[in-house]
Amino acid sequence: MRDSGVIGIYDSGLGGLTVLSAIHQVLPNESTVYLGDTARVPYGNRKPETITKYALANVRALLAYAPLKLLVLACNTITAVALKTLQDELKIPVIGVIEPGAQMATAAGDKIAVLATRATVQSRAYQEALTKCGHEGFVHMQACPLFVPLVEEGMVDGPIAREVADFYFRQLPKDLDTIVLGCTHYPLLLPLLQSMMPEDVKWVHSGEAVANKVKGIIGNGNEAAPLRKYLVTEAPDRYRQMFEFFLGKPVLKEQVELIDVRGI
Amino acid sequence: MRDSGVIGIYDSGLGGLTVLSAIHQVLPNESTVYLGDTARVPYGNRKPETITKYALANVRALLAYAPLKLLVLACNTITAVALKTLQDELKIPVIGVIEPGAQMATAAGDKIAVLATRATVQSRAYQEALTKCGHEGFVHMQACPLFVPLVEEGMVDGPIAREVADFYFRQLPKDLDTIVLGCTHYPLLLPLLQSMMPEDVKWVHSGEAVANKVKGIIGNGNEAAPLRKYLVTEAPDRYRQMFEFFLGKPVLKEQVELIDVRGI
């Protein structure tokens, strides 16, 4: 069924791979093409106009590479800034990471904390999405800016990660029932984070929420040998190993390609 | 004497401010213009050609802003990649951060460790500079990738910074006599790092080495009211506070300007 299009996943860098991983688990027989804009990562501190310009150029390059039937913006920053523009621009469904996570959190609990980067906290995108989903309970936004460098260093357990997590957890209010991982890097820290919180706390991994939403729109795929491509805008050799770490499975050299994103 | 030019300091972001700070201490009566390419920071993972392109465009913008009598590349990555090109291109002295630090380290001791980012370690620029300076003793390169995010979070002391420093220090060989801070962010961690090492270890702050080299070339300035300008390529309001943290002194709103770096 590849003729009818593949699922495109676009992120500024690596974090979106946790969303891709969830899509692979929920929809193992769908083809996927992942694009990480490694030449311009990180987007966090860029101006909204710059991020929108990057997003349009990257998505055009992705569309030129493969026919897409659905596009996932697997990055909180891109979702917060450019979701509406891309939904207006494209003729296929475009899904961000924020709303599915907010919906899952609203269904899961009442007293919610969202762990996120400082840029996501400041964007107020989660607070607005939770309100839009009808959540009326308590919401605490917790910026955890050291989590991304820890994950990118592969330090997802051990005393440093524990000390950093403890530092942020001490700033959380008591009696939370639900914690949202509001950054695509954070699922790699989940085993550690879970071990440090009471067992009855519910955890929302927005990648899982996105994967379920994708399945709701396009149904189950049925490809016997689905395509798995990883595109980067710089340094394919350097990133292949990182892809393997984030996905927890081998990625072959020929699966990673350098893509030319013109006009940016 | 401003007519004869000011000292230009160029970095990808904030780290070069520790070099600027040392220049202000050693040469308090010289005018300085600092340019941080905040729209494109960090450079660490970019291709050499990309970094050279950025460097040429930024330096042209700096020259258009003020007449320079000397340019400091206050960044290890830019120095490693683009020093030679800029020295060939410009008619003024161009100084990088690596060679002055290597010279100071060679004079200071025999058994040397260099703390640096992973990119700087991989570039082998310090090893080559130390050899070029005639250093024949032992050199250990230690990548400390979590130091930059710690400093940018303002976490330069306390249990997390201590745990991270301890993690890297455990990887150092015994009996070092000299430690080089091979990244411009690291001087902000110096009080903590010094407190964790034997007192007789000598510390090389390459900003100080650069400032002394600048003084050797241009002599003491004699301006009564030297110019202090801070240019950024994005988000002047967001960065002003960071400038104050890095410099340890107030920076006025009117001292920070957005600059248009064309052609990149």
Image (cartoon, coloured by chain):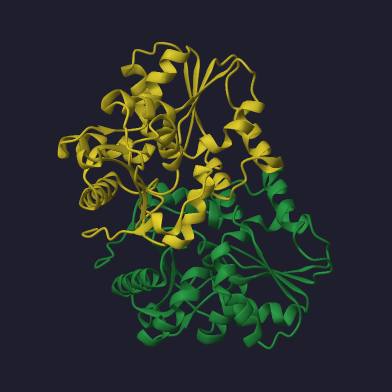
Chain colours: A yellow, B green
The spot of residue B99 in percent (x, y) is 58, 80
Foreground residue among A247 and B229:
A247
Identify the image quadrant of the C terminus of chain B: bottom left
Q: How many labels does the image show?
A: 0
Identify the image quadrant of the N terminus of chain B: bottom left
Relative to A15, does residue A22 appear above or below in the rendering? above
Is any atom of residue B250 visible in this view? no
Q: In which quarter of the image is residue B3?
A: bottom left
Looking at the image, residue B211 sits to the left or right of residue A237; the answer is right
The spot of residue B209 in percent (x, y) is 61, 76
Q: Residue at x 56, y 44 (%)?
A: A151
The spot of residue A5 in percent (x, y) is 23, 40
The spot of residue B243 in percent (x, y) is 48, 54
Is any atom of residue B177 visible in this view? yes
Looking at the image, residue B105 sits to the left or right of residue B49; the answer is right
Looking at the image, residue A52 sits to the left or right of residue B89; the answer is left
